[in-house]
Image: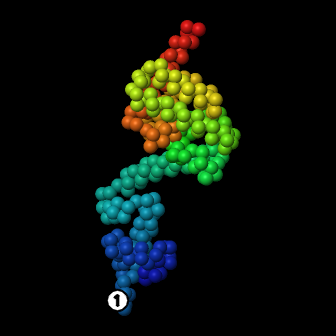
């Protein structure tokens, strides 16, 4: 008994267009003909189609399916093992993407409770990069300082944020002035600015010991998105992030020495 393309389409749950595509690709062609000369699919063709659909469900490309079906020496088990490894890798990647998406939603829902208009009014050129904020949240989420900082940020009012940004803007002017006048990054003026930044974080977000401040400084120097949260691109200079990192680490040494002498 032979089956027309329409009948096979309904039996297998695939479109006629798909069957024509398999035929054109040489993967599955009707092997029978009706008395009137119409091409029909036979029982062997249906069995082959079932194999094709099985491999397609597993994500095999058509050329690899053709190799498995046509080559008597092809080891289908080897192909299946390779596909199994690939699928597991994709599952791991997708699970990671789900985690990142969940964290992004968490970050988006916490931190700064302002309308878009209020954000622009308060933050100006300082932009909130969700990709960086999410990565930072994934990186630091288990640290108490990060959790406390997120909670404090969530509680700040518009007036609080306005004051925070005003203090930050004044500090940036002093930082860039020190940099432009070539004050040494490990000199007193630069280290004082670093200490002022550390205390700003402690006052508004979370206690910031010098080792934590050093990790923040490393992020500033390594990731432009992190530094843009502190200094907008229009105010940046080449080397400014590294300059600040050096000043922060130098200040950490100074603070440690002062504690030993006390």
Picture residue at 54% right of the left edge, 46% below the top? 124
Residue 138 figure quarter: top right
Picture residue at 43% right of the left edge, 59% below the top? 59
Residue under pointer 1:
37
Is residue 242 among what the camera can see? no
Is residue 39 among what the camera can see? yes
Q: Is residue 79 above or below residue 186?
A: below
Q: Nearer the viewer, residue 54 or 127?
A: 127
Q: Is residue 91 above or below residue 240?
A: below
Picture residue at 51% right of the left edge, 26% below the top? 193
Give the x, y percent position of residue 61: 38, 61
Q: Nearer the viewer, residue 100 or 6?
A: 100
Picture residue at 55% right of the left edge, 8% below the top? 261
Q: Nearer the viewer, residue 93 or 116?
A: 116
Horizontal side of 76 relative to 165 (left or right) equals left
| Quarter of the image that includes the C terminus | top right
Give the x, y percent position of residue 99: 56, 46
Residue 111 figure quarter: top right
Q: Is residue 16 above or below residue 78?
A: below
Give the x, y percent position of residue 91: 50, 50
Most extreme residue toward the top is 261
């Amino acid at each position: 008994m032979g089956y027309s393309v329409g009948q096979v389409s309904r039996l297998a749950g695939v479109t006629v267009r798909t069957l024509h595509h398999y035929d054109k690709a040489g993967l599955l062609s009707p092997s029978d003909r009706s008395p009137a000369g119409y091409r029909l699919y036979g029982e062997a063709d249906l069995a082959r189609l079932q194999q094709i659909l099985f491999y397609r469900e597993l994500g095999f490309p058509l050329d690899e399916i053709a190799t498995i079906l046509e080559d008597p020496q092809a080891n289908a088990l080897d192909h299946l093992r390779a596909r199994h490894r690939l699928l597991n890798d994709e599952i791991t990647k997708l699970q990671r993407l789900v985690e990142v998406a969940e964290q992004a939603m968490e970050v988006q829902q916490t931190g700064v409770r302002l309308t878009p208009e209020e954000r622009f009014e308060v933050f100006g050129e300082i932009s909130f990069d969700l990709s960086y904020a999410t990565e930072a949240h994934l990186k630091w989420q288990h640290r108490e300082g990060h959790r406390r900082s997120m909670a404090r940020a969530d509680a700040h009012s518009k007036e609080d944020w306005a004051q925070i940004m005003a203090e930050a803007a004044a500090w940036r002017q002093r930082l860039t002035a020190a940099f432009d006048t070539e004050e040494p990054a490990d000199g007193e003026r630069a280290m004082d600015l670093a200490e002022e930044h550390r205390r700003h974080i402690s006052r508004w977000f979370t206690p910031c010991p010098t080792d934590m401040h050093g990790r923040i400084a490393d992020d500033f120097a390594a990731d432009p998105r992190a530094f843009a949260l502190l200094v907008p691109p229009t105010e940046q200079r080449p080397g400014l992030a590294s300059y600040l990192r050096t000043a922060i680490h130098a200040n950490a040494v100074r603070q440690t020495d002062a504690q030993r002498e006390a």
